[in-house]
Amino acid sequence: MAKKTPFYDKHLEYKGKIVEFAGFFMPIQFEGIIPEHNTVRTGVGVFDVSHMGEIEITGPDRIKFTNYITTNDVSKLAFNQLQYSAMLYPDAGIVDDLLVYNLKDRIFLVVNAANTEKDYEWILQNKKFNVEIKNLSDDIGQLAVQGPKSEMLMQKIVDYNLTELKYYWAVETKIKGIDVLLSRTGYTGEDGFEIYMPAKDGLKIWDIVFDAGKEFNVKPIGLGARDTLRFEMRYCLYGNDIDKTTNPLEAGLGWIVKFDKGDFIGRDSLLKIKESGLKRKLVGFEVIEKGIPRPHQKIYADNNEIGFVTSGTFSPSLKKGIGLGYVGTQYTEPGTKFYVMVKEPILVEVIKGPFYKKGTHK
Amino acid sequence: MANIIEGLKYTREHEWAKIEGGIAITGITDYAQSILSDIVMIEPPKVGTQIKAGDAVGTIEAVKAVSDLFAPLSGEVIEVNEKVVKEPAIINRDPYNEGWIYKIKVNNPSEAENLLSAEQYKELIAGH
């Protein structure tokens, strides 16, 4: 039986279309993917992301241990700063991608919903040094408030001066007396915040956010638009673009791998992969004429199969089909053209960077 | 609750057909558009093609999903609604009127007996 998040009744009240996702009943959409997408690009929207997993690491060796299980360098984080990172298997396949928060007396990991149990087991299995590990997922509710108007909304309900909260920084503060962890983060490319709160206080926070957001026409946003928004920014989705069969270098995530920080799980294999040269890379591409690429479709060039699509959708902002896929390294230069086998082959062109380039994230 | 129009014929694949004087106007049902949501691209069969009832003759793409268009009846495609090709969201707004997709000059009007009535279609989607 799928779980309900603290906001389940709100999804029903706002007439969300409910689906089962990663073991939770979640709203896939409310008024429609495209209008919701546009709300976040131009105004402010609120996502229930309580399905995400939260794992806490405490103890004197928490930084040393987190550095051992993740690829980015935790020792570089200031107090209340966070980073995007990954956990690897010894063969350099990806266990998960995650956020690592360096908070007062604890490291706080935020992991993908579908991977929470797997990640927690993995971390326990690899436990060493003097640390304690707890899975807090069931007790934490999470809302993401995203869009160019998100700061104006949030400033109405927190005492903290939000112009001082920079991108990828966090603060432990209160919203109307309720303890929350607030960070300037998101998965949309727009300015935005993520609020972690005790699950039992979730509905109160929802009401506070929606009351404060009335004047900005705030709306609830479903998982459908969450995917189109992240995709336009070319953010990876675990399960589509990265998984245990892909390594961070070929996925374009070399920037979160710090080889020089010392040992971490997967380091040796990944270093070998790096030294022997990548065979394929994840690229973003746009459809030149008509058609929408979809996951698992094959990619062809020069009469050869050169790769496959990992994510594909219609971009509401660009109004055309966009895709991500792994292709041989000789096909990754921006401007390279190849064919995706939809029903018939459609011509696409490799692009550089995010598909949508006007995001307001700070 | 999905809107179902009396007097139209329906397929199990969620197309509707309005048959008058040997011509069938076709589209997808309100139920189909609500399941697909946010239709962004449509490729109907080309004018002049001969199509056979039950065959996949076109494609309808939403943001998250793609679906085939199935021919409700056999015949010749005589007109395509260019408005919905340009602006597929019309189908989400008004699937039975402005959102019609193409017209067929029907070969054999008795084929319509194989299609579902509004009542039968209602039962079909009640099971979903």
Image (cartoon, rainbow, N blue to C red):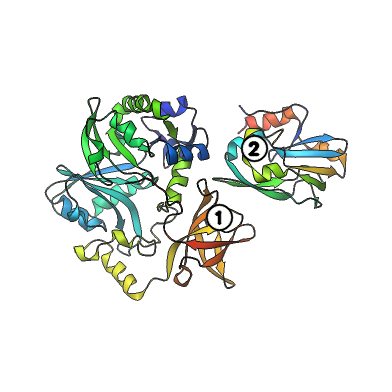
The disc placed on residue A293 is: 1
Q: Give the residue drawn at x 34%, y 53%.
A: A96
In the image, what residue type sits under mark 1?
Answer: Pro
The percent position of residue A135, horizontal first and vertical second, equals 26, 42
Q: Quadrant of residue B32?
A: top right
Q: Quadrant of residue B119?
A: top right
The percent position of residue A59, horizontal first and vertical second, equals 13, 46
The percent position of residue B120, horizontal first and vertical second, equals 72, 30
The quarter of the rendered structure image containing the N terminus of chain A is top left
Asked whether the residues under marks 2 and 1 belong to the same chain, the reply is no
Mark 2 residue element: helix
Query: Which residue position is annotated with label 2?
Result: B90
In the image, A348 versus A108, the foreground residue is A348
The disc placed on residue B22 is: none
In the image, B124 versus A342, the foreground residue is A342
Label 1 packing within 10 angstroms: few (<14), some (14-19), many (20+)? many
Label 2 packing within 10 angstroms: few (<14), some (14-19), many (20+)? some
Is B50 displayed left or right of A151 in the figure? right
Mark 1 residue element: loop
In the image, what residue type sits under mark 2?
Answer: Ile
The percent position of residue A147, horizontal first and vertical second, equals 39, 39
In the rendered image, the vertical position of residue B44 relative to residue A216, given as above or below: below
Chain containing the residue with disc 1 = A
